Amino acid sequence: MGRRVFITGLGLIAPHGEDPESVFDRIYQGDSAVRMVRSGTVDFGSDLPLATADFTPKDRIPKTQQLFMARASQMAVVAAEGALQSSGLFGVGQEGPEDGEIGVYMGCGLGGAEILQEGYRTYFVRQSRRGRPSTVPMIMASGPASHISMRFGLHGPTHTYSIACASSTVAIGEAFRAIRDGYLDTALSGGAEAMLNDGSIAAWERLGVLASSHTDGPEASSRPFDLERTGFVLGEGAALLVLEAESALQERAVDPIAEIIGYGVSSDAFSLTEPHAAGQEAAMRSAITDADIEREEVQYVNAHATGTPSGDPIEIEAIKSIFEDHASNLAVSSTKSVHGHLVGASGALETAISAIALQKGRIPPTANLTDPDPSCDLDCVPEYGREAPELTVAISNSFAFGGSNATLVLRKV
C-alpha cells in the first residue's frame, strides 16, 4: 500500500480566467468562453470559434526571460506561481519554495507552435536563414517544464509528457505514482498548450475535426453529446496542480482540495485518429483497480468528450461497458462545452475542475446539450450544473490521437 497523495494547490491560465474558484463558478453556470476569432489575415485566414486565454506576461515575467519563452511556457510559469502560492509553498515576493526538491511533471503537445510558424515564415517567405537564435529551445515541448524548474529553483525530476490530448493527465498520473511510491514528497504537475497560431489552426481545419459556428452563436459551437455537434473548439491555457504526500501535507498543516487515488493508462493499438472503446475501457478499469474501489463508488465522470461525431458515442459505449448497470446512476459531463479543447493542457484543467467539483459538491454541466444524441443516452448533465452534496468519487478521462488513454480517480477529502 503506497502513500496517500493530495492536491493542495491550483494555478490556472484558462479561457475563463486565472482564479480557480471563479473559473469553476463560470463553468458550473454553463458560461461559455468560446468566441469567434479571426485566424490569419483578412485575405488569407478563417473566422472560427476558439477559446482564447486573456493572457499577457506583462510585468509577471522579466522581459529578458520572455525573449526565450514561447507563449505556452509563459502561461505555464504564471500558472505554476499561482499553484505554489495557493498551496502555501510559495509566498508573494518569495523567489522560490524553501524546499527546492520538488518535481515538475508537465504535459505539452506541441510546445512553441507560434515560434515554429515564425521560423518557417522567415525561411520560406522572407527567404532568410537569419531566424531567432533561440528558436530551437523555444519550440521544444519540454520548454514549459524547464522554465518552471528554472524560475522557481525546483531541483527534483523535471519531466515532459507529449502524448497529444492525454499529455497532462499522464503527467499528473506519473507524478501521483512517484509520490505514492516514495520517490518524491511534492510535485508541480499539469499542462500547457498554445497552438492558436494560424498554421496550427489550418492543420486542424484540414483534419476536419474543428467545430463550425452554431446558429445560436459561436459560444454554442462546442456541443458534446448533442445531435448538432460538428467537432471541437480549440482552446489554450495552462493548468498546474501541487501534489503532496500525506506526510508533507500534515507537516505544513494544509487543507487539501482533493485526493488522487487511482491512475490508469492504455493504448488502443488501433488507429492514429479514430477512438476505440476497448482501449478507453482498459484505462478506466485500470484506474478503478488502482484506486482499490468498487466501480459503484464512482459518481461522476468528467468525460473527454470533445464534440466530434464519432468520439462521443465511443466514450459512452466504453463507460457503459465498464460500469454496466451502474452506468445509469452516473453523472457524465464534458466541460469542453464551455472552455474548449486545450489539447495537452485539457486533462490538467479538467482534473482541477473535478477536484473543485468534489470540494464544493457541485457537478458542472455539459452546456449547449439541447438535443441529445440517442447514442449518448447516459445522464450527461445537460445545460445546467447540479448540486451534489454527496459527491465523493469522480474520474477524469483523457483520450488522445495515437490511441493513448489515461484516467485519474479523485476522492473528496
Image (tube, rainbow, N blue to C red):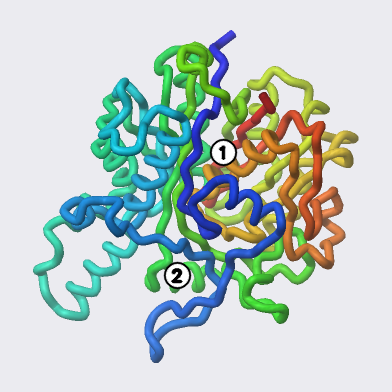
Residue displayed at 43% across by 77% down: 39
Q: Which residue is mark 1?
A: 267
Residue 346 is situated, as x and y percent measured from the top left of the image, at: 54, 49
In this rendering, the answer to whether 187 lies above or below 27 is above
Would you identify the image quadrant in which residue 124 lies?
Answer: bottom left
Residue 158 is situated, as x and y percent measured from the top left of the image, at: 32, 31
Residue displayed at 36% across by 33% down: 91
Residue displayed at 87% across by 34% down: 326
Which residue is at the front of the view, 96 or 117? 96
In this rendering, the answer to whether 334 lies above or below 291 is below
Residue 35 is situated, as x and y percent measured from the top left of the image, at: 56, 73
Would you identify the image quadrant in which residue 139 lies?
Answer: bottom left
Q: Within 10 angstroms of label 2, few (less than 14), some, or many (20 or more) residues?
A: many
Element marked by disc 1: strand
Task: Give amino acid for label 1.
Answer: Ser
Residue 344 is situated, as x and y percent measured from the top left of the image, at: 47, 49
CB atoms at circles 2 and 1 under 8 Å apart?
A: no
- The residue mark sitting in front, 2 or 1, is 2
Relative to 178, 389 lies left or right: right
Indicate which disc residue 373 carries.
none
Q: Which residue is mark 2?
A: 201
Residue 38 visible within the image: yes
Relative to 204, 375 lies left or right: right
